Image (tube, coloured by chain):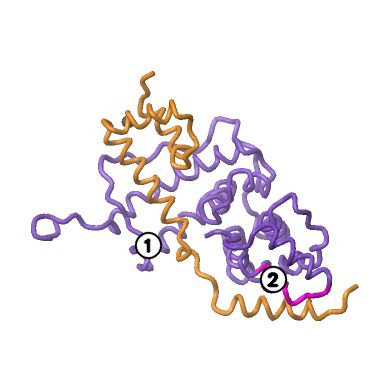
Amino acid sequence: MKIDCKHVWDHISDYIDGDVEPMLRAEIDRHLEHCEICSAVMDSTRNVVVLMADERIFEIPRGYSERLHERLQEVLNEPRV
Amino acid sequence: MTPQPSMSAEATAQIIAKILAGEKHLFHDLIRPLERAVFVMLFSLLRNETDAEDAAQEAFIKVYRNLHNFRGDAKFSTWVISIARNEGLGLLRKRSSRPEEPLEPDLDGEAPKGDFTPAMLTDWREVPLEALERKELRECLCRAILNLPPIYRDVVQLRDIDEMDVQETADVLGITAGSVKVRLHRARTMLQKELVPLLKSFATPKRGLFGRRV
Ligand SMILES: [Zn+2]
């Protein structure tokens, strides 16, 4: 089985998640060795996924946690119904 | 970001039992590991900080009031995120003056309308995590995520930002694991396509001889 670039792109996401069959994975690896476009597409996509997971992307408003726990304390103080 | 970094299912069950038995103050500790994930999820859904914070408060109050309904067959984090998401969706529905795109159109089976071809390039220089110290980069990523169509934003949010697994994501969204994978694939491709040209300037410069930048 020889796979083309289009076929590799279809599996990028699963490949990054380690969710492709070993046979297909080996085929993709072989393709990536000689195709600089697919390796760059794979590397850049993985890079984007790694960056997105970083906590710094989304800032939490200052005082969010304090306000949340204050509000919860009011509810916790209510007599049980 | 992992919603529940340290608490095991048993530890969670024990704390819940204690809270229900009257040690209410433990509720603060129970939800602390989830408060960030809940806010970020609601922010990406509502795209407004104040609304996200209000919705997060309401969601955690619902979690407390419904704690006796939690069954150990789901992960506590998944259960909480689902409650928060429903809270957010309810708010979106109320914003009838600001019509949002349809929330869950079922288009995984159809021929996709968007273009899901990646940006083509022949050389990628890694953008390291340290580059996130730069505000422009953080804003660039944040904007790209928020601009995704809602069904793609949802899966990116739960899978890539909250780092839930495929099945948990499917449970929260009420879709199949297969749909999660399809949407995630399209979402990541769209993000790659949009971000590649923008991220290039944040890459580590290649160094030539004697550490010169080339
Ligand atoms: Zn190729």
Pinpoint residue A81: horizontal percent, then vertical percent.
91, 72
- Label 2: which residue? B57
Q: Colour of chain A?
A: orange
Pointer 2 or 1: first along the chain: 2
As drawn, which residue projects farthest toward the left?
B210
Judge from the rendering whether residue B123 lies leftward or rightward of residue B35; answer left or right.
left
Residue B120 sits in which quadrant? top left
What number of labels is visible? 2
Q: Magenta stretch containing residue B28, yes or no? A: yes
Q: Magenta stretch containing residue A10, yes or no? A: no
User: Few, some or many C-alpha atoms within 10 Å of disc 1 (few <14, some 14-19, many ≥20)?
Assistant: some
Q: Are marks 2 and 1 in contact (CB under 8 Å)?
A: no
Closer to the camera, B206 or B100?
Answer: B206
- Whether ligand 1 has any atom under 8 Å from the Cβ at mark 1 is answered as no
* Residue at point 74%, 77% (across, down): B25
Label 1 amino acid?
A: Leu
* Residue at point 82%, 68% (across, down): B20
Pinpoint residue A7: horizontal percent, then vertical percent.
41, 27
Q: Quadrant of ligand 1?
A: top left
Label 2 amino acid?
A: Gln
As drawn, which residue projects farthest toward the right?
A81
Residue extent of the magenta highlight: B22-31
- Label 1: which residue? B137
Looking at the picture, does residue B19 appear above or below residue B168? Answer: below
